[in-house]
Image: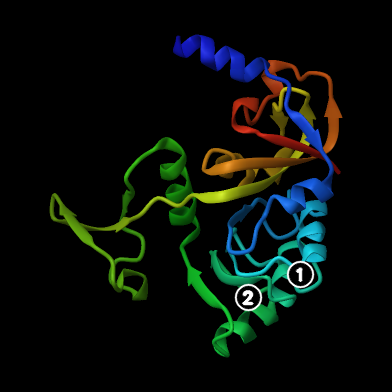
Amino acid sequence: MLFGLLVKGFLSVKKIITATEAGKMIADGSSLMIGGFLKCGTPTKVIEEILKNGTKNLTLIANDTSFPDSDRGKLIVNKCVKKAIVTHIGTNPETVRQMNCGELEVELVPMGTLIERIRAAGAGLGGILTPTGVGTVVEQGKKTVEIDGRKFLFEKPLNADVAIIYGTKVDKFGNIFLEGTTRNFNQIMATAAKTVIVEADEIVDSLDPNMVTIPGIFVDYIVAA
């Protein structure tokens, strides 16, 4: 039965929607994962629609807040985000300003830890244990576990209402090919959100199975970029 459900998921044609329709799926107060590493492998058209809609109070989960004039950075500049869970903010002075003024809550997470927290959510795990951050400010307020004389931090899984990810090529079943370093956060974020929207550079009828980076079973909607 499980095999049958998996096959059905892989062979189901996904709904292709416009960026405008996708933007309307992100409601005020949503938690939102956005793939990409700075400008590499980042979906942009759906972000523009979020800006047009004036969506507010978002919890942004991403590697970074990009640059003030680019993709995720524009969400910060336009004050669409109330909290950012990211690995660094140095490329966006506006993020720093809002954080220092108390206008934006920022949770800085070591990059490997952020990836593993998202992975844990996608795998249905209760959390992860990591030595990263032990003895630093990262440890403050967190549970610790000692195993074989070594101290670890317990980190909770991290999921989202919606994930917007990028695809170099996407077929009508939602299977995604990501070229080179565009994989970055896109691949793991596809597993950890209630609704997954992929913004595709190119939509094709089908992909060679050997090219598939993200199986279509994780994807709900496709937007043509």
Q: Is residue 39 left or right of residue 135?
A: right
Number of the front mark, 2 or 1? 1
> Residue at the location (47% across, 55% down)?
114
Q: Is residue 172 above or below residue 27?
A: above
Question: Which SS class for mark 1?
Answer: helix
Name which quarter of the figure residue 221 lies in: top right
Q: Nearer the viewer, residue 117 or 152?
A: 117
Q: Quadrant of the N terminus?
A: top left
Q: Amino acid at mark 1?
A: Lys
Q: Position of residue 214 (x, y in %)?
A: 63, 31
Among all residues in the image, which is located at the extreme bottom? 101
Q: Is residue 131 above or below residue 224?
A: below
Q: Amino acid at mark 2?
A: Gly
Question: Which SS class for mark 2?
Answer: loop
Is residue 43 at least partly visible in the picture?
Answer: no
Q: Is residue 190 above or below residue 141?
A: above
Reading the image, the residue beneath label 1 is 74
Dot 2 and dot 1 residues touching (CB under 8 Å) = no
Q: Is residue 75 left or right of residue 120?
A: right
Q: Position of residue 57 (x, y in %)?
A: 61, 69
> Residue at the location (74% across, 53% down)?
24
Reading the image, the residue beneath label 2 is 90
> Residue at the location (62% across, 84% down)?
98
Q: Is residue 216 left or right of residue 107?
A: right
Q: Position of residue 169 (x, y in %)?
A: 79, 32
Name which quarter of the figure residue 31 lies in: bottom right
Q: Position of residue 54 (x, y in %)?
A: 76, 68
Q: Quadrant of the C terminus?
A: top right
Name which quarter of the figure residue 7 lies in: top right
Question: Mark 2 or mark 1: which comes first in sequence?
Answer: 1
Q: Nearer the viewer, residue 143 or 8?
A: 8
Among all residues in the image, which is located at the extreme left? 149
